[in-house]
Amino acid sequence: MRSDASDATRRRRTHRFLWAALAASALSLALAPSAFANLITPKSGGSPNADQIHSLYLIILYIALVVFVGVEGALIYSLYKFRAKKNKVAAQIHGNTRLEIGWTVGAALILVILTVVTFVKLPSIINPPNSQAPFLESALTQPSPPNGKKLVICVQGRQYIWRYVYGAACETNPFKAGLPYSFQTMYVPQGVTVVLSITSVDVIHSWWVPSLGGKVDAVPGYITYTWFQARGPALYHGNCAQLCGRQHAFMTALVDAMPPSQYQAKIAQLKSDIQKANSQVTVLRAYLTKTGNL
Amino acid sequence: MSVITAPAATPVPQVTTRAVSTPRQTKRWVDWVTTTDHKKIGIMYLVTTFVFFFLGGIEALLMRVQLSEPNNTLLSGERFNQLLTLHGTTMVFLFVVPVMAGFGNYFVPLMIGARDMAFPRLNALSYWLLLLGGIVFYVTLFYHPPEAGWWSYPPLSEIQYSPSGGQDAWIFLIHLTGISSLLGAINFYATIVNMRAPGMSWGRLPLFIWAILVYAVLLIIALPPVAAAVTMLLTDRHFGTHWFDPTSHGSPVLWQHLFWFFGHPEVYIMVLPGFGIISEVIPVFSRKPIFGYKAIAASTAVIAFLATLVWAHHMFASPVPIVVLGFFMLSSFLIGVPTGVKIFNWVSTMWRGSLVMTTALYYAAGMIAIFLLGGITGIFLAVFPVDWQLNDTYFVVAHFHYTIFGGAIFPVFAGLYYWFPKITGRLLNERLGKISFWFTFIGFNVTFLVQHSLGLSGMPRRIYTYQPGLGWSTFNLISTIGSFILAFGVVLTVINVAMNYKRGALAGPDPWKGNTLEWFVPSPPPVNNFDAIPRVRSVEPMRDIRRQVERATGVTQKTGGSERFARA
């Protein structure tokens, strides 16, 4: 038999506890994006699509936290409050149709909101914007920024390295002579809309550089597309995300974003390096053939 | 199996089954090998699947040790890939799905008032095919385990990239366990539809039975496509076809569709019986009827229907048109509604109840706490643009462990503590059980909560090592430590079982004041289960019987079990 006074103290204590919990969760909500970067939010900051995914994620996170705290709270409360020690007689309730309909509709409403938010956000994630730096070339692949000006890079997955071929011509034949290419590190001009045309020459790989947006599978026999517009100058790190064999862990991708002028110099250098290496090979092959070793 | 002749307390129902013991004609092991008794087959299922659970657990611990620090050289990439394939395949095909069949085998006939399954010999065949599948698969340890992951995506699983026979053993395992599950499913379906006690209409079917019924239907729907898929893979590997070979106009994406058309219903095949166990345990220990019986039964059926429409959410990064992605996002959202309804109903069942805090209830409440987070992260993953960031990372690993470990394995432990007295006639040690629960619960969260952060900071799944300085090292170390706490918790339950299956306190027929008919018969039940099958008048027939006895005798029925844990 409790007195009214102790009941009131208890209630006050419960209220204080509830307020503290509310304040703590509000604080963590406010701090979530900054203090806990990558603890409870995905990577972003390298490219607009990654940022848009990040903000979509945050909206879902806020709604999810409310649901999570509410349901776990009800669970913990009933485990605490209704144990046999405290509550000797169980109420014999079989259900409540209005309540059932209520939470079914409530859950559905949350999902309707999420659907709307997703489809509102979707265009900014899948449609590339115009380049912010002077354009380099244009081509007829999907996706495309409104003015059609973009840089196309072909990405080829293979066990266990990525090969990048620069320029729209790569889409017809990525092994065409004279096209500049590089392995593992991709060079891109910052502020330019880069469209990736992705495939694989052996097993399934998955292209993923977290700060530059979501992942896209590299499937042999298919060409998949994604895009980014790197802020740079920076080196972005990524991993192949689909199990592709024993050295899957070492199939990393680096994206080196630099000013456009530097990029053009870099590509020119790649071209001349490849040419130099090719001519050396030609000389060597001629020599080996002549000496009968080939 | 010894027959309890003098239970600790007076049996609740005065009319009970008399044990019929005939002198043993054959050796004990011959008895087990040739048995068609659903209870013995159920026990064999449970023991076998738990052996595979420990094998799968050891594989997981090895992987966690390898990942505990960057550039660890304990395991090579080859070994690691073998372990992850063994772990995933074992847990799905040799533990979670068949352990539910184990509980189903033992308790479906008892709960519906039948004397055995509809096809007892088919039932035995199901078990032996499962064991054979497990053996075929684990024999690869002596030559070359498969290493293409439990989805075995071609071209990686094709002969050019996985030339070893281990991949073929994996295919064989899918076939053997598939036939086993299919036969078991047909058996469950026939049993539940035809052999219910008089008066047990569909509206009075225990919720665990509803779950097993739907589990059976889902297995019948989902298994044929994967059987077809692995057969196509087999002919690709050895008989010159090119179903999945892009160099000859085959499509690797075709495999993904076929596999996940099985693979996603499989998820619900694993968790729905778990939901069923929870729906039995919670009302018994809340001393309150289940809240919203019809809603829970209906949501089980709705989940099963939707489960066949969400498979491509595993393929959001694959070459699939945007409109298809949109469809699968919406269907995946939809499945959240009936799942949420279940959780709300369980919490409401406890609300204003009089909770008897047994270990079984601990595990049931732990299931709700954990599965909720798994469900919520599922909504994140269903939003396909967000999934582009999260797919194939440790976020997904965390998500599906929260759903499967939370939604299926916690209920398995709840079911173990709840039904062990019925199976053996002995109670498990509650104190040890609760210690085991806390280690399991805390260890689980330490292991998998940080894996969300690992995925969000960019760590893909299935990599065997990583470089320092990527922000992954601390999370990985925490996760590894957690996995050992978790393993310790599980081992405590094993010790509990080992200590008490012969020497534990006698349980009597109805230690928990159960609601369903299995508590009407002695523990362990005699071979014929029931001498006379009681007429069922509600969804809680055992409760009715107890009340009837109390009315007739004027004495509140004591039971051998739960009061002593109630502390009230």
Image (cartoon, helix red, strand yellow):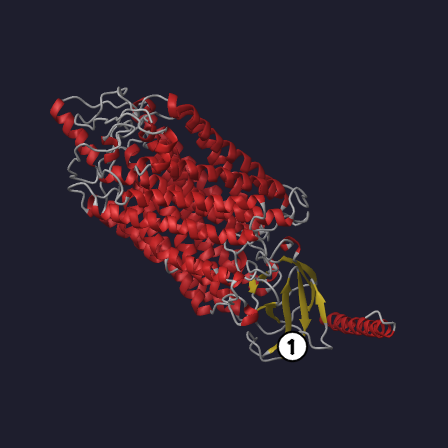
Q: Amino acid at mark 1?
A: Asn
Q: In the shown orientation, is residue B34 left or right of residue A259?
A: left
Quadrant where the N terminus of chain B lies? top left
Q: Position of residue B369 (x, y in %)?
A: 41, 41
Instruction: Give the secondary structure at mark 1.
Output: loop
- Please name the residue that numbered disc 1 is placed on: A173
Q: In the shown orientation, is residue B148 left or right of residue A160?
A: left
Quadrant where the C terminus of chain B lies? top left
Q: In the shown orientation, is residue B24 left or right of residue B236?
A: left
Q: Is residue B420 above or below residue B153?
A: above
Residue sitting farthest toward the front: B25
Q: Residue at x 31, y 30 (%)?
A: B422
Q: Is residue B405 visible?
A: yes
Q: Position of residue B460 (x, y in %)?
A: 58, 53
Chain bearing tag 1 is A
Q: Position of residue B59 (x, y in %)?
A: 55, 41
Give the camera-side residue of B136 and B457. B136
Q: Position of residue B482 (x, y in %)?
A: 54, 37
Q: Is residue A173 above or below residue B451?
A: below
Mark 1 neighbour density, 10 Å: few (under 14) some (14–19) many (20 or more): few
Q: Is residue B385 above or below residue B296?
A: below
Give the camera-side residue of B337 and B102. B102
Q: In the shown orientation, is residue A262 left or right of residue B243?
A: right
Q: Is residue A12 visible?
A: no
Q: Residue at x 47, y 65 (%)?
A: B254
Q: Residue at x 17, y 35 (%)?
A: B533
